[in-house]
Amino acid sequence: MKTRIASWVAAAALTVSAVVAAAAPASADPVPGNANQFYAYCSVDLLGVPLACTETDAAHSSHICQYVVTGVGLGLDCILR
């Protein structure tokens, strides 16, 4: 029984990792000169605040983003290109 559960858990982990790999863009470009920043395409609200950002290549990006540590956890800081 333990072998079946372990193989089911391993199969689920492989499926999740495959979905995450498929969601990640194949051609995400890093920002030259800064390893912490990346190019992203962001949807914005009426005030121009980025709402949802996805890593992309330099040609299709609208913002340059980086992850920052905040008081409530990890945040995303983006600037318009």
Image (tube, rainbow, N blue to C red):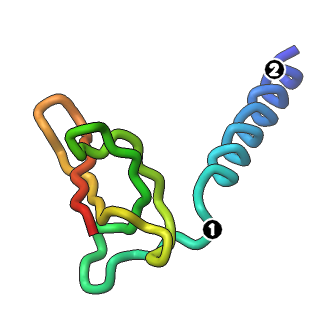
- Residue 17, given in percent of the width and then of the height, sits at 67, 45
- Residue 14, given in percent of the width and then of the height, sits at 75, 42
- Name the image quarter holding the C terminus: bottom left
- Name the image quarter holding the N terminus: top right
Q: Residues within 10 Å of mark 2 (few under 14, many from 20)?
A: few
- Residue 68, given in percent of the width and then of the height, sits at 20, 50
Viewed as shown, does residue 2 lie left or right of 72? right
Is 67 located above or below residue 14 in the figure?
A: below
User: Viewer-proximal residue, 25 or 16?
Assistant: 25
- Res. 5 mark: 2
Viewed as shown, does residue 47 lie left or right of 21? left
**Sequence-earlier tag: 1 or 2:** 2
Is 51 located above or below residue 12 in the figure?
A: below
Q: Nearer the viewer, mark 1 or mark 2?
A: 1
Q: Secondary structure at mark 2?
A: helix
User: Viewer-proximal residue, 11 or 23?
Assistant: 23
Which residue type carries mark 2?
Ile
Residue name at image x 24 percent, y 46 percent: 48
**Mark 1 vs 2: CB contact within 8 A:** no
Residue name at image x 26 percent, y 40 percent: 74
Residue name at image x 88 percent, y 22 percent: 4
Which quadrant would residue 19 be assigned to in this image? top right
Please give the residue where the numbered disc 1 appears in the rendered image.
26
Residue name at image x 44 percent, y 76 percent: 58
Which residue type carries mark 1?
Ala
Which quadrant would residue 24 be assigned to in this image? bottom right
